Image (spheres, grey):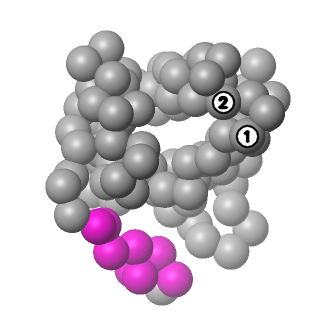
């Protein structure tokens, strides 16, 4: 089960919580950008991240999901894109300073 709550300080940010993980979903110009995606170390390699991203994709459909990545997470995001869960991987760091308003 996933819960979605509005960030208490940043209006464009929705926080997704699942058992063992969380992520920021940041909406801008009809795109959802992923940030602060985290899975507890004890829950990794158990499908928690994929399940969370599938729930996020369903929650925001039909809005496309884009992400950047840190080097060790690139294979995960490539898998999410190959499975149609996200639409775009941006190969440079996304600047989210604009969310602070």
Tell me where residue 35 appears, x and y as whole percent.
49, 56
The residue depicted at 35 percent of the width and 53 percent of the height is 71
Q: Determine the secondary structure under disc 1.
A: helix
The residue depicted at 68 percent of the width and 54 percent of the height is 6
Does the magenta-highlighted stretch encompass residue 95?
yes
- Assess disc 1: are there few (<14), some (14-19) or many (≥20) residues with their C-alpha within 10 Å of its C-alpha: few
User: Visible in this render: residue 92?
Assistant: yes
Q: Which residue is mark 1?
A: 41
Residue 93 higher or lower than 35, as above or below:
below
C-alpha span from label 1 to label 2 = 5 Å
- Assess disc 2: are there few (<14), some (14-19) or many (≥20) residues with their C-alpha within 10 Å of its C-alpha: few
Residue 1, quarter of the rendered image: top right
Q: Which residue is mark 2?
A: 44
Residue 17 higher or lower than 24, as above or below:
above
Does the magenta-highlighted stretch encompass residue 54?
no
**Bounds of the magenta span?**
93-100
The residue depicted at 18 percent of the width and 55 percent of the height is 91
Tell me where residue 90 appears, x and y as whole percent.
21, 52
Circles 1 and 2 in contact, beta carbons < 8 Å = yes
* For residue 18, side relative to residue 49 (left or right): right
Tell me where residue 68 appears, x and y as whole percent.
31, 54
Q: Determine the secondary structure under disc 2.
A: loop
Seen from the viewer's position, the closer of residues 73 and 24 is 73
């Amino acid at each position: 089960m996933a819960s979605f709550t509005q960030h208490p300080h940043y209006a464009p940010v929705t926080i997704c919580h699942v058992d063992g993980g969380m992520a920021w979903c940041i909406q801008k110009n009809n795109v959802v950008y992923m940030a602060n995606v985290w899975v507890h170390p004890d829950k990794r390699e158990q499908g928690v991240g994929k399940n969370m991203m599938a729930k996020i994709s369903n929650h925001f459909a039909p809005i496309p999901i884009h992400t950047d990545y840190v080097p060790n997470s690139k294979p995960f995001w490539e898998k999410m894109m190959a499975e149609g869960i996200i639409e775009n991987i941006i190969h440079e760091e996304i600047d989210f300073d604009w969310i602070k308003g």
